[in-house]
Image (cartoon, grey):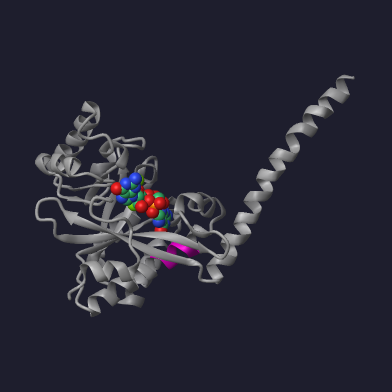
């Protein structure tokens, strides 16, 4: 009887688990196919100067245009791409495509100070990481000093000399380094000293409830003050209201991105809005 019960509960859980595993496997196969099939595209979200409102750059954000479900957000496939290593070819593609787009805009007179690209941990851990990034630059002609790489805190925590050397090599090329989602990771602030970082991006979660939430106001203001004291640029993400922008501007935040100005845009929409007329 005990055995039957055991089998019963076993039988109850297994189909669920294997359905999940099967779903994962299918997603992985579809991702793999998507790379060869050119189903990925980039959207670009503008970054504006908080004071003048001038366009200072943009962030490239990948989307997956699936044949059956339309555009899929990166939060739904980046984690699996990272686990499976598919992020390596995908990351290369993103980098090149972003740089190529920057050159196209340059050709029509739309000059961006920087294009920011999200780099995943797997990419940074690759031994030939720096060489690959250099190749993307030389293949497209996009100047190194106009490329910004967004890293996360966890990528810098507990990483050894190799990571440090790679980041230094990237900096030596003129590439700028930004810490994405700042304040949400394991923040040992020591890495700000150890690694040559140019910029902090205040995570959206701290911006969302400004100005209503006192704690969030204080956190945002503290990050801005610290960044300024360390002579780092500071960018706020997820700015949706005038009140948020006003608060950030008053505290000395330099740049922002968010729906207040624009969501991530197709290259065409971006050029139509910000290009010369
Ligand atoms: P992230 O780098 O922090 O990007 C910001 C996310 O916030 C984007 O989501 C953007 O659409 C969203 N966002 C921007 N402004 C607002 C706003 O005002 N309000 C709200 N509610 N959201 C806003 P998205 O495009 O879905 O990207 C999600 C995450 O996926 C990114 O977060 C980044 O971590 C990752 N990701 C995107 N593209 C790439 C990529 O090419 N490579 C890697 N490794 N990761 C990527
Ligand atoms: Mg980012
Ligand atoms: Mg971010
Ligand atoms: Mg974020």
**How far across and down, in percent of the image, does residue 167 sit?**
31, 55
Q: Residue 133: x and y, percent?
A: 37, 66
> Is residue 264 something that shows in the picture?
yes
Is 252 or 267 nearer to us in this picture? 267
Q: Is residue 12 above or below residue 84?
A: above
Please indicate, yes or no, whether residue 189 appears anywhere in the rendered image: no
As for residue 6 lying within the magenta part, the answer is no
Q: Quadrant of the C terminus?
A: bottom left
Magenta residue span: 89-94
Of residue 262 and residue 144, the one placed in the foreground of this image is 262
Task: Give x and y (percent) for residue 255.
Answer: 18, 51
> Would you place residue 1 above or below residue 85 in this image?
above
Q: Is 242 on the left or on the right of 91, as rendered?
A: left
Horizontal side, residue 19 vs residue 60: left or right: right
Q: Is residue 90 magenta?
A: yes
Residue beneath the point at 21% across and 36% down: 220
Q: Quick one: 33 or 128, which is closer to the camera?
A: 33
Residue 44 occupies which quadrant of the picture? bottom left
Furthest-right residue in this view: 1
Where on the picture, by quarter, is residue 124?
bottom left
Q: Residue at x 76, y 32 (%)?
A: 12
Quadrant housing the N terminus: top right
User: Hey, which residue is sitting farthest top in the picture?
Assistant: 2
Q: Please tell me whether the stretch drawn in magenta is mainly helix, strand or loop.
A: helix
Identify the residue at image location x=14%, y=37%: 225
Q: Position of residue 181 (x, y in %)?
A: 32, 43
Q: How many marks?
A: 0
Query: Is 79 left, or right, of 133 in this rendering?
Result: right
- Residue lying at the far bottom of the rendered structure: 107
């Amino acid at each position: 009887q005990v055995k039957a019960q055991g089998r019963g509960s076993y039988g109850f859980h297994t189909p669920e688990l294997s359905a999940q595993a099967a779903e994962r496997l299918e997603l992985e196969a579809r991702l793999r196919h998507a790379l060869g099939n050119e189903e990925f595209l980039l959207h670009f979200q503008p970054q504006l100067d908080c004071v003048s409102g001038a366009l200072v750059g943009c962030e490239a954000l990948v989307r997956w245009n699936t044949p059956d479900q339309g555009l899929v957000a990166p939060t739904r496939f980046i984690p699996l791409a990272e686990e499976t290593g598919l992020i390596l070819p995908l990351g290369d593609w993103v980098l090149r495509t972003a740089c190529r787009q920057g050159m196209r805009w340059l050709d029509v007179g739309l000059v961006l100070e920087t294009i920011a690209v999200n780099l995943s941990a797997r990419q940074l851990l690759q031994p030939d990481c720096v060489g690959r990034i250099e190749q993307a630059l030389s293949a497209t002609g996009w100047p190194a000093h106009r490329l910004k790489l967004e890293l996360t805190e966890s990528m810098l925590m507990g990483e050894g000399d190799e990571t440090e050397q790679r980041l230094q090599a990237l900096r030596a090329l003129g590439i700028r380094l930004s810490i994405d989602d700042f304040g949400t990771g394991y923040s040992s602030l020591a890495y700000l000293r150890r690694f040559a970082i140019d910029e902090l991006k205040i995570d959206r979660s701290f911006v969302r409830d400004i100005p209503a939430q006192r704690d969030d106001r204080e956190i945002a203001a503290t990050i801005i003050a610290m960044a300024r004291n360390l002579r780092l640029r500071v960018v706020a993400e997820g700015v949706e209201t005038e009140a948020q922008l006003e608060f950030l501007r008053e505290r000395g935040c330099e740049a922002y991105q968010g729906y207040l100005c624009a969501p991530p845009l197709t290259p065409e929409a971006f050029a139509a809005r910000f290009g010369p007329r």
